[in-house]
Image (spheres, rainbow, N blue to C red):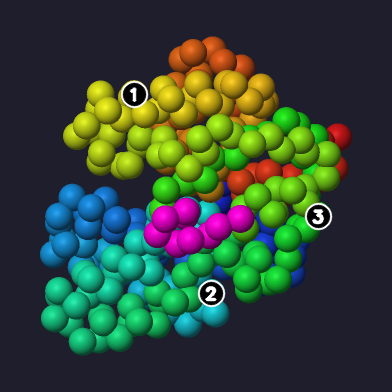
Amino acid sequence: MFPDTGKAVVRLLRRLGVDVDFPAAQTCCGQPMVNTGYLDEAVPVVRTFVDAFAGYDAIVTPSGSCAGSARHQHSIVAERSGDASLVAAVAETGPRTHELTEFLVDVLGVTDVGAYFPHRVTYHPTCHSLRMLGVGDRPTRLLEAVRGIELVELPHATECCGFGGTFAVKNADTSVAMGADKARHVRDTGAEVLVAGDSSCLMHVGGMLSRQRAGVRVMHLAEVLASTEEDAR
């Protein structure tokens, strides 16, 4: 649904000297099924994940949601399946799965990735990255090192945007109310661009901002970090 985000991750990592592969066999991480209680139906999806990513040094995803699923939910699914080989495979892939900012800061040891993005930006920390993974200030440290950027703090930044995947479907009114609060806080910053580390949150809040004709565009963090002066020209 958001191919530009994946392309930005590949461009960014290759620029930093990482040998990047994109195994075509990969599919969904399985989180939608797990979150709605279909743990048995998630077993083949988890099996596909561990098979597709077997043998890689690191698995990098531009989504705190997906990284959280691989690191925390896959073991629940595997143990429930009773398949010892799947349990062992998940124990291998889980710790090697990194949300993008974790990989950049903790594994590569960089905060300045050579990006250039001359715009007024505000950052929304997504729930799974903040609460499930504990990425902390890694994203803002990366953004602060971007040349040309004007980074402004988002009021009530740690409040959920209201998307929550299936939550938005099952509890639509509550989801919309939470999203409206988030959109209002974004407008209050005067930012040109709302940045986040999960496309799902950007889709939810970005949809509201678009319908409000707020003049604020949304971009994944990976796209900002992949931007260069050459792109600006």
Circle 2 residue: 58
Q: Position of residue 36 (x, y in %)?
A: 18, 50
Look at the image and tell me whether residue 3 can be seen.
Answer: no
Is 21 left or right of 16, judged from the image as shown? Answer: left
Between residue 20 and residue 71, name the one nearer to us.
71
Instruction: Please tell me which residue is depicted at 48% across the width and 76% down the height of the picture.
Output: 96
Q: Is residue 43 magenta?
A: no
Between residue 29 and residue 166, name the one nearer to us.
166
For marks 1 and 2, give the one nearer the viewer: 1
Report if the CB atoms under discs 1 and 3 are less than 8 Å apart.
no
Instruction: Please tell me which residue is depicted at 52% across the width and 38% down the height of the picture.
Output: 157
Q: Position of residue 124 (x, y in %)?
A: 54, 40
Circle 1 residue: 177
Q: Amino acid at mark 2?
A: Ala
Q: Amino acid at mark 1?
A: Ala
The numbered mark, 1 or 2, whose residue comes first in the sequence reads 2
Instruction: Name the image quarter holding residue 72.
Output: bottom left
Is 117 left or right of 1, judged from the image as shown? Answer: right
Which label number is shown at residue 114?
Answer: 3
Q: Amino acid at mark 3?
A: Gly
Look at the image and tell me whether residue 45 can be seen.
Answer: yes
Label 1 Cα neighbours within 10 Å, binned few <14 / some 14-19 / many ≥20: few
The numbered mark, 1 or 3, whose residue comes first in the sequence reads 3
Report if the CB atoms under discs 1 and 2 are less than 8 Å apart.
no
Q: Position of residue 230 (x, y in %)?
A: 85, 42
**What segment carries the magenta color?**
129-137
Label 2 Cα neighbours within 10 Å, binned few <14 / some 14-19 / many ≥20: some
Instruction: Please tell me which residue is depicted at 65% across the width and 64% down the height of the picture.
Output: 104
Is 116 left or right of 46, judged from the image as shown? Answer: right
Instruction: Name the image quarter holding residue 188.
Output: top right
Instruction: Name the image quarter holding residue 9.
Output: bottom right
